[in-house]
Amino acid sequence: MLKKMINIIATGIVAVVMVFSSFMITAQPAFATDSNVGIFGVETAILKDCGDKAEDSEGGGIFCILNIVLEVFTYGVGIAGTLGIVISGVQYLTARDNEAQMTKAKSRIINIVIGLAVYAVMWGFLQWILPGGVLRGN
């Protein structure tokens, strides 16, 4: 049973990677220009939202990329937490008289809430140490 579940999860991960790889292969190439736009005089699609923040400090571009990665992880954690709560809620609702299943669902919900709280604290700390974080505005 566990082996079958691992195979299904691995197949799903491979399928997702293949889909995203196909998008990367067919994407239009981006070329840098000599004009004075974007960060450090190079026109880019990803870092243009950072504006003057990246040019004000040394290594500002990497902090901008780290901020983007942190935002993506935050969305991912939010989606995963929501899905986990929904799945655990359905498990709790369908438990009926099965006390073990109800306890399992309750403990999952509690663990998800604890995980979201820990991520929120970590996110706040990273925003505090990351120059140009989300809380500092544009």
Image (tube, rainbow, N blue to C red):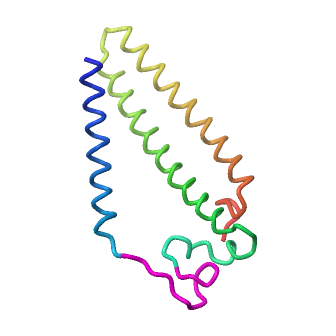
Spot occupied by residue 66 in the image (x, y as percentages of width and height): 60, 58
Residue placed most toward the observer, 135 or 129: 129
Q: Tell me: 98 left or right of 135.
A: left
**Image height check: is 5 above or below 59?**
above
Spot occupied by residue 104 in the image (x, y as percentages of width and height): 42, 16
**Image height check: is 113 above or below 39?**
above
Spot occupied by residue 123 in the image (x, y as percentages of width and height): 64, 46
Q: Tell me: 100 left or right of 16.
A: right
Q: Tell me: 3 left or right of 53.
A: left
* Quadrant in the picture for the C terminus: bottom right
Residue placed most toward the observer, 25 or 138: 25
**Image height check: is 62 above or below 91?**
below
- Range of the magenta residues? 29-43
Dominant secondary structure (helix, strand or loop) of the stretch shown in magenta: loop
Residue placed most toward the observer, 110 or 1: 1
Which residue shows up at 48% across the image and 50% down it? 75
To which quarter of the image does residue 30 belong?
A: bottom left
To which quarter of the image does residue 113 belong?
A: top right
Which residue shows up at 32% across the image and 49% down it? 17
